[in-house]
């Protein structure tokens, strides 16, 4: 992979430093990388004396991340007016214009949008696009931006960035974990991060409702294909209400399917609203890529962690995704 141009990081940090007022946006179904990166940038902005706001399309941030600074200042907007030429609109961890609040597509021409992301399929929708798929996480990219701009890295900022790093790499176990990721983790620990504090905040803070939800999904896992290499499970709206769970409680669930021996491709179908199904895809090395199957259904994402949203009844979408997976898998076998 070619080296990401340092100049772009400097340009992005320069744009931030020359803008007195930032609005930070994160994507729907916010994860640890989105929340951690936003909290880090928010804190850095405040330290630099900027006016900072933080906006997203989820009603609330996931509970496990509420220990991070400034999460209490998060604002929910379904739709946002992008019309202030003096404002810097910063998008974090958002691969396209439809993953966040509505309104970005109809922004006025003179608005300035900074796109900071690590998704390979980022559509480069910003005025300035600082997108580096070689970064494990947006947090890793943001760290490099802050270093390039010679910004102060406080223990608080380090803890936010570490949260993004640890969640997007599956606690340093996913294939996006590189030597640079571990060097960054070491650097953040040197800056004062307590990994056991962050770990227990994020991974030992489950609600009983989310356990009840997972129990429902785990009790109906279906495994099929060659040596049982494909796995799928699903959750309907009923499951959420019976478990008293919320959409954010599905975070991490699809990964559980990958922990079954032999499973190399996993899918979770969740019906949050009637007539629409959100699908999460995960794949291992030496297997058709999650992103290939997701793209076949109008979605996208990282090669091995991708998603899509498909209209229809759950049973129909289930049949559709199974056949899409089998088709793409057969194509992948034939191409080897
Ligand atoms: P998750 O399964 O954790 O919700 O999403 C995994 C990855 O897939 C995310 O990082 C995101 O980039 C991508 N993704 C999830 N849902 C969608 C979707 O509906 N459309 C697109 N284009 N990408 C998605
Ligand atoms: Mn990310």
Image (cartoon, grey):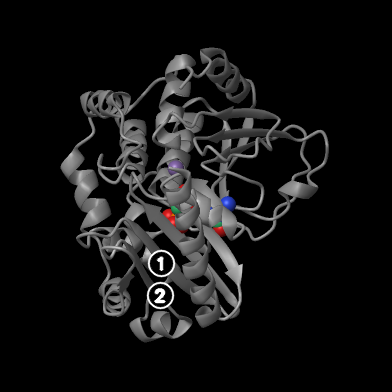
Picture residue at 31% right of the left edge, 79% below the top:
220
241 lies left or right of 85: left
Q: Ligand 1: does it lie within 8 Å of the C-beta at label 1?
A: yes
Q: Where in the figure is residue 216, as x and y percent of width and height? A: 30, 80
Report whether residue 127 is seen: yes
| Along the line of sight, the residue nearer the viewer: 51 or 318 | 318
Q: Where in the figure is residue 15, as x and y percent of width and height? A: 63, 22
Question: On residue 234, which mark appears?
Answer: 2
Question: On residue 286, which mark appears?
Answer: none
Q: Residues within 10 Å of mark 2 (few under 14, many from 20)?
A: many
For the residues labelled 2 and 1, the Cα–Cα distance comes to 5 Å
- Callout 2 secondary element: strand
| Ligand 2 visible in quadrant | top left
Picture residue at 41% right of the left edge, 67% below the top:
268
Q: Where in the figure is residue 107, as x and y percent of width and height? A: 78, 44
- Snapshot quadrant of residue 70: top left
| Along the line of sight, the residue nearer the viewer: 50 or 322 | 322
Q: Residues within 10 Å of mark 1 (few under 14, many from 20)?
A: many
| Along the line of sight, the residue nearer the viewer: 19 or 258 | 258
- Callout 1 secondary element: strand
The answer to whether 325 is drawn above or below residue 158 in the figure is: below
Q: Ligand 1: does it lie within 8 Å of the C-beta at label 2?
A: no
268 lies left or right of 22: left
Q: Residue furthest right?
A: 109
Q: Are marks 2 and 1 in contact (CB under 8 Å)?
A: yes
Q: Quadrant of the C terminus?
A: top left
Pointer 1: what residue? 268
Q: Where in the figure is residue 141, as x and y percent of width and height? A: 45, 29
73 lies left or right of 296: left
- Snapshot quadrant of residue 254: bottom left
């Amino acid at each position: 992979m070619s080296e990401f141009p340092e100049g772009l990081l400097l340009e992005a940090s320069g744009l931030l430093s020359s803008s007195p007022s930032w609005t930070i946006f994160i994507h729907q179904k916010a994860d640890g990388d989105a929340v951690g990166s936003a909290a880090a940038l928010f804190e850095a902005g405040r330290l630099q004396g900027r006016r900072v706001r933080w906006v997203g399309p989820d009603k609330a941030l996931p509970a496990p991340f509420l220990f991070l600074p400034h999460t209490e200042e998060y604002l929910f907007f379904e739709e946002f007016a992008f019309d202030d030429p003096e404002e810097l609109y910063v998008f974090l961890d958002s691969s396209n214009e439809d993953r966040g609040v509505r309104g970005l597509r109809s922004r006025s021409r003179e608005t300035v949008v900074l796109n900071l992301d690590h998704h390979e399929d980022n559509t480069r929708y910003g005025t300035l696009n600082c997108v580096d798929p070689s970064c494990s996480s947006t947090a890793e990219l943001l760290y490099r931006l802050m270093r390039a701009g010679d910004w102060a890295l406080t223990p608080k900022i380090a803890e936010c960035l570490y949260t993004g790093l640890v969640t997007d790499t599956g606690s340093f176990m996913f294939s996006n974990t590189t030597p640079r990721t571990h060097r960054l983790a070491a650097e953040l620990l040197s800056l004062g991060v307590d990994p056991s504090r962050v770990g227990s905040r994020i991974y030992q803070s489950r609600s009983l409702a989310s356990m009840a939800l997972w129990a429902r999904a785990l009790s109906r896992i279906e495994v099929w294909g060659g040596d049982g290499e494909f796995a799928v499970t699903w959750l309907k709206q009923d499951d959420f209400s019976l478990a008293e769970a919320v959409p954010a409680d599905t975070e991490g669930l699809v990964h559980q399917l990958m922990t079954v021996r032999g499973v190399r491709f996993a899918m979770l179908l969740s019906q949050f609203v009637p007539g629409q199904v959100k699908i999460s895809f995960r794949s291992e090395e030496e297997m058709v890529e999650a992103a290939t199957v997701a793209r076949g259904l109008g979605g996208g994402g990282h090669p091995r962690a991708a998603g899509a949203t498909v209209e229809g009844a759950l049973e129909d979408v289930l049949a559709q995704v199974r056949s899409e997976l089998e088709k793409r898998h057969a194509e992948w076998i034939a191409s080897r």
